[in-house]
Amino acid sequence: MRTFLYFLLLMIVAAAVIILAAILGDVGAWYFAWLVGTTMIVLISAAGAALLDAQEEHAAAEGLAAVGRHERT
Amino acid sequence: MIDGTVVDLSRIQFAATALYHFLFVPLTLGLSFLLAAMETVYVTTGKRIYKQMAQFWGGLFMINFALGVATGLTMEFQFGTNWSFYSSFVGDIFGAPLAIEGLMAFFMESTFVGLMVFGWERLSKGQHLAVTWLVALGSNLSALWILVANGFMQDPVGAAFDPITMRMQLTSFPKLIFSPDVQSKFVHTSIAGYVTAAIFVAGVSAFYMLRRRHMPLAKRSFRMAALFGVLATMGVITLGDALGFVAARVQPTKLAAMEGLWKAEAAPMPFNLIAFPDQARQENRGVVQLPDLLSLLVTHSLNRTVPAIDALERQAKQRIENGIPAVQALQALSRDPKDAAALAQFDAHRSDLGYGFLVQRYAPDLSKVTPAQVSEAARDSIPPVAAVFWSFRLMVGFGLLMLVFFVLAALYTLRNSAQEKKWLLTAAVWMIPVPFLANEFGWLVAELGRQPWTVFGVLPTWMSASTHTVTYMAFSLIGFVALYSVFIVIEIYLLVRAIRLGPTEHGDSGDEPPQPRPAPAGRPSAAHVTEPEG
């Protein structure tokens, strides 16, 4: 039941977003662009931070592997 | 008749307070969304470093926010004290967005700012993240309503003048808030704030990286700011183009001044890259042109032309002559509101009422107006070209400089090598003042380009001010400039002090170890320490 209510809530949000997009896209195209653009800028910026974490973890793992190889030889 | 010096001093006072205030606002608009981005990463990954980032940059946000509020409050009062005729004339329209800004957006912003600062230990991670997003939304909604009010001054739609009440009245709220000028101006201004915050965060992070301090925080902040900034700068340039397109239709005199366009030319028109406009002679000196570019930029076509100042002046003359009977009818209606002939005369000429007011500066008795006075008023309908022309070029030049910087910063940070490029980091620190200057020049283009009107085509600036004395205006202007200069010094002192201290109080040890070593197997490095959900 809880999952269904959660699903229903998300569907209502999705419907509201579609209606908002349809109205804003028609009479307020730049407002719509601001909403979408701001969300995109924030998400890409956040994804960049997550990518940096992954790059550093990868570099640290490679460093460990190099130390391991050095110790074996 | 209001003393011309009083009008000039009122203008200088409002410009000074607005320019001071606009040093703080863009950083608030952009930093709030950068904080939301940092906290979103913290909540989704659970890594403590992002909480430290959100708290450190949040501290700087609060210093800026507090001083931004202090400098902004006086501006709304100035409409009543120094621009009383303007407030009476358009208060029914202008007051509504300002009231909404105060009651909805500003209270929303202030409430959630309190929760954001004091809620770290009292709210769950999800609740605090929602609060931070609401702060960002509230800050930008505040800006929206201010820009709705300003957009009405640039392109007065959704309102009509009532000759009985002698005031402008709102006829369509949707028209007011969905005006193309308001929309593009809001998005342009809001995203210019994102660029300002991105440069600020990148510059301060670069400062730390140059000194090898707080490296985990600085690297992540620089990465986020670079990506945030590169996209935002592209957005600002796109919206700048949209604003120019709108101005060509609704404020042709502003556009002609921005381009230093004195005489009509055939399409495709060249773009004046460099010129020294001479307002008295109505010509440019030392011109460097790029062929065909103006038509392409402004009309998005090679076949269309842009109206030049000579044609716009001729048009203004006709509108002044058509506006004179409207003002005369209004004078008759003020004596007898039931005068049907006067009402009919007013309705026939109402579209040019503002132009009738324009010539009243030279001919208070409109029955004795001369062709020379009409010509003088028509010449006055052109804004100060040199100031608008160069403010526009400096704004665009700084914008392009920031785009180049962000593209390089994004490239190097995505390769995880920005921290090794000393020249890039040094450039980032020196870039910090650039967006602030670009914002100020942008505001000058918008407001100087609107002259000689407070409400474009409707109400001239010369008759909008209050009837103060010169002494009163000079005294209050000196007071404001002195007080706001103190605010700027306080802001810079507090920001520099907080930046020098760094994020140490949040548990970051500060300096990077001299010899980085890989973490022991199975144990993540300090930057990757995660927190349990909750």
Image (spheres, rainbow, N blue to C red):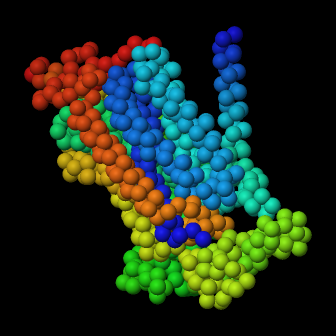
In the rendered structure, the answer to whether residue B490 lies left or right of residue B341 reads left
Q: Is residue B194 above or below residue B111?
A: below
Expressed as whole percent of the image width and height from the top left, the position of residue B326 reads 76, 74
- Quadrant holding the N terminus of chain B: bottom right
Task: Tell me which residue sits at (49%, 47%) in the image.
Answer: B74
Can residue B449 be seen at all in this image of the molecule?
no
Can residue B22 be seen at all in this image of the molecule?
yes
Task: Tell me which residue sits at (72%, 38%) in the image.
Answer: A19
Expressed as whole percent of the image width and height from the top left, the position of residue B226 reads 36, 44
**Residue lying at the far top of the rendered structure:** A1
Question: What is the count of numbered marks?
Answer: 0
Q: Nearer the viewer, residue B46 or B442?
A: B442
Expressed as whole percent of the image width and height from the top left, the position of residue B262 reads 52, 83
Expressed as whole percent of the image width and height from the top left, the position of residue A14 reads 67, 31
Q: Nearer the viewer, residue B329 or B459?
A: B329
Task: Tell me which residue sits at (84%, 64%) in the image.
Answer: B337
